[in-house]
Image (cartoon, rainbow, N blue to C red):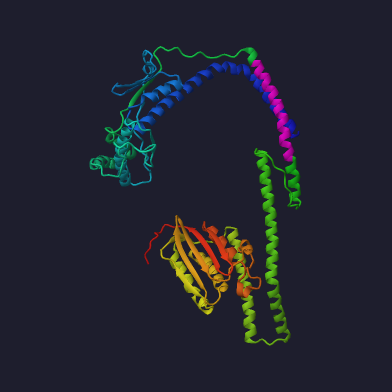
Amino acid sequence: MSFRLRALALLMLLAMAATAATAWLTWRQATRQAADSVTAGRQVVSRITGELYAYGFAHGTWEGISPTVSRLAKDTGQRIWVATEADELLADSDALTGREPRAVSRQPPVLVDPRPTLRLPTDQVPLASVKRTVTAIGEYRAAAAYAACLTRAGAKVTARPNSIGVPRVRTDGEAPAQCEEPAAASDPKAARDHAEVQKCEGERRFATCLQRTFDERIGAAAPPRLQVRLGVRDESPPTLATVGAAARVAVAVGVALAAILGALLLSRAVLRPIRALTLAARGLGAGELGQRVPVSGRDEIAELGRAFNRMADSLQAGEERQRRLTGDIAHELRTPLANLRGYLEALQDGVVEPTPELLASLHEEAMLQQRIVDDLQDLALAEAGALTYHRADVELRDLLETCRTAHRAQAESAGVALELAAPERTYTVADADRLRQVIGNLVGNAIRATAPGGTVTLALASRDDLAVLQVRDTGTGIPAQDLPHLFDRFWRADAARGRATGGSGLGLSIARQIVHDHRGTIEVESTVGVGTVFTVTLPLGSGSVDGTG
């Protein structure tokens, strides 16, 4: 059975089931409405108590609560009576609207405690939690006093809990002169607070004891707990609505018609893109990697089409990369292997004498081919995420000094000054050997690109949470049109530079992959005739950053 018929049959079954269930749903309506009424009542209570708590939390006093009570009564339609636990009346919505106060409901009052709940990390040792609790007590006293002063001065007060749950009080504009914003001053009660909080260290329920002690110590500064009563005594409950038979029949018929129409539209909307996906998938399986499907909209079918197109793009790009890599490898190995074969055959035939110089040249050529193969293996492992890293804290200034020492002889023979500019000790978490491989590749390239009398500088600095390593040279520079290809496999900026003078052409590709595996970036800037700057950024590690030597 086709998808359209199955969808139509399913929706018709749903329509008939909905029609048969109409009578039962009607019988259940009264119960549901009662439950909804209870739920709505809970939501109203939750909203009222939540806003009252937020007021006390932010203002540090119940003064000025009347407008909030009046607004809540208007929004919810409830009669709201608010008093302290000592029965001190704070606000009555009947009195606020000019109405004769009615008898309050007999239901138990709802308690509202404006004192904050501490947010103590569970993984901290008791001593740290004790210190944070003592700090929170002092911060709350100061914040409550400041908020109460702002409230009495008529300023608009807002508050948000900080990391431990204590309110952080703010006001729009400039605070009144009589109100001093909380400062990190010493609290004369801090010693007593610490002694009381420290008693919790032996308690079995440590966190509960800290909260209880916190509540006791801020009791004098915090607003008193509220008791809130809602409604009026002997108030009649709301009547439940009923649905007539004609309305039930109309609803059932409407559901059936809508289901059938929806089935037709759904099958048409779904099957058309599915047919296109099926044809494209068949073509893709047959090797036609250029197959794509038209995509419009933002529904699930459209997202499926986009995913298919992305998959096809990835397959096509991978096939092209594989072909290009195969061609590059064949190009790089064909000529030197042909030379090796020619010399070996000449030696075998006795045409060429096996002099030490010739054997050394052949050995060097074989080593170059071995290096290309090793670089290809490293690149394949890196791109597959299988390259092994031994991560540890690495001091980058020492790493740059090591690279400088390793390349000093090469630089001196080329007449290039190799300098280090690293005033700070900067740390990162990385594989030191792999990072030396990256920096060594950049330094070697820089020395080869710099004329005698030039300078190559290894620089190190920290910026925000990043370590920034730079290899700067005063060489010939790289044309702007060549920069996008710099990290491509087997690509060289100087077409005349071969393997003997320009490396295998894989070093920068490997370097980029290693840096990316360390959650870093590598970028290049260059100006022809001025020089080139390679910049490697890495996340700072757990070590310190200082300016000592």
Q: Please, what is the dominant secondary structure of the magenta stretch?
A: helix
Q: Is residue 255 magenta?
A: yes
Q: Position of residue 489 (x, y in %)?
A: 63, 64
- Side of 266 relative to 408 (left or right): right
- Side of 40 relative to 495 (left or right): left
Asked whether residue 387 is in view, the answer is no
User: Looking at the image, which is closer to me, 207 or 81?
Assistant: 81
Per the rendered image, the range of residues in magenta is: 248-274
- Could you tell me which residue is drawn at 55 percent across and 70 percent down? 446
- Side of 284 relative to 184 (left or right): right
- Side of 242 relative to 252 (left or right): left
Q: Quadrant of residue 203?
A: top left
User: Looking at the image, which is closer to me, 222 or 369?
Assistant: 222
Q: Position of residue 518 (x, y in %)?
A: 51, 58
Instruction: Say above or below: 209 vs 77.
Output: below
Instruction: Say above or below: 30 vs 458.
Output: above
User: Looking at the image, which is closer to me, 388 or 376?
Assistant: 376
Instruction: Say above or below: 521 vs 107.
Output: below
Image quarter hosting the N terminus: top right
Q: Position of residue 541 (x, y in %)?
A: 44, 58
Q: How many marks?
A: 0
Asked whether residue 375 is in view, the answer is yes
Instruction: Say above or below: 492 vs 195.
Output: below
Q: Is residue 523 magenta?
A: no
Image quarter hosting the C terminus: bottom left
Q: Quadrant of residue 154?
A: top left
Q: Position of residue 544 (x, y in %)?
A: 39, 59
